[in-house]
Amino acid sequence: MAILKANSDNIGKAAEIIKNGGLVAFPTETVYGLGANGFDGRAAAKIFEIKKRPSFNPLILHVSDPNQLKEIAVIKNEKTLDLIRQFWPGPLTIVLEKTDKVPDIITSGNQTVAVRMPSHKIALELLYKSGVPIAAPSANEFGKLSPTEAVHVEEQIGQHIDVILDGGQCEVGVESTIIEIGKNEISLLRHGGLPVEEIEEFLGETLTRKTNLPNPIAPGQLPYHYAPKIPLRFIDSMNHAELKDKKVGALFLTSNEYDFSFSSVKILSPTGNMQEAAANLFSFLHEFETENLDLILCEKIKRKGLGKAIMDRLTRAVNKFEKN
Ligand code: TXA
Ligand code: MG
């Protein structure tokens, strides 16, 4: 790991790292972010690993230009563009419907994606030189304070990342304000660097408060959280008789050791690479949904490293079906 002064050369080096699937910590006007190529599911999985998040939590995609939005989000409410013109670049994150180009791990399987254009010059240059949206949560370990200086990043996660771009202290010092724009309603999900009153005054309307949800919000607590439409169970909780005449999909980590004719088998990572496994998880669950199955069975995965986040997600989904 190296802390690099954020001059033009070093920002160029950092952009190459992002393009090649590596991670870079960089300053924004709010807090330092831990960035990865937003189109690269495996790189995004590394973020969760390094932050030691016990669960997947959707990430914000950062863009260098409002025009980049077309690639990642669908705009259905014209107030979106008004808000962007008024408040971007700046500490306002907007949650919109996602396009297929955004990997499911970025959004934790949600059909919506959070996007913001930061105003920090270094962040903008890094984004511009990378040529891709950058997925970045705050560059701290789960449950610890968000970093507002490069040394805060170094202390917490420095040993795991390739480069920290040092841009001095963050001006705003708290994370961005997050709003979700639905077709007919705009809601506030997180108070942050842009006072909500300013947004409300601009729009001439009051935003629906959805801020009393735990933050960071774990996927199982989200009202909009994704769970497969087909029942999901752990494979060791079922017996052959229960599966008779059923079309069953099966999800394994490295291989299928079961003597049963599944209708569909998916392997998260044949080599047991947990970044690959995490990057595939939500996509595979989505795929199962299109395969006309009665049931999905999944293997229990060792709760180590990213395995914790994967198991957290699977357990929540399984619990849902066991309760109902
Ligand atoms: O200021 C910021 O926003 C910083 C800098 C680095 O840009 N980033 C940041 O990211 O605070 P993070 O991961 O610490 O917080 C992102 C929050 C999460 O708590 C998550 O719940 C919410 O954004 N979020 C992301 N995608 C969402 C979605 N599709 N729907 C609802 N909430 C979402
Ligand atoms: Mg955070």
Image: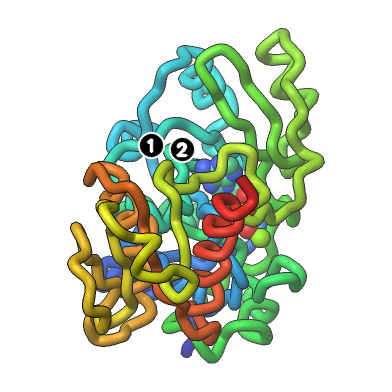
Of 70 and 142, nearer the camera is: 142
Q: Residue at x 54, y 34 (%)?
A: 94
Q: Where is residue 91 in the image (x, y as percent from the top left)?
A: 63, 42
Q: Where is residue 250 in the image (x, y as percent from the top left)?
A: 30, 65
Which residue is identified by label 2?
Answer: 112
Q: Is mark 2 within 8 Å of ligand 1?
A: yes
Which residue is identified by label 1?
Answer: 98
Q: Does the residue labelled 1 lie within 8 Å of ligand 1?
A: yes
Of 27 and 138, nearer the camera is: 138
Q: Is residue 317 positioned above or below 19 on the image?
A: above
Sequence-earlier tag: 1 or 2: 1
Q: Is residue 53 positioned above or below 230 on the image?
A: below
Q: Residue at x 53, y 38 (%)?
A: 89
Evaluate if marks 1 and 2 touch, with contact meaning CB atoms under 8 Å apart.
yes
Q: Residues within 10 Å of mark 2 (few under 14, many from 20)?
A: many
- Element under disc 2: strand
Amino acid beneath label 1: Lys
The quarter in which the C terminus is drawn is: top right
Residue 127 can be seen in this image = no
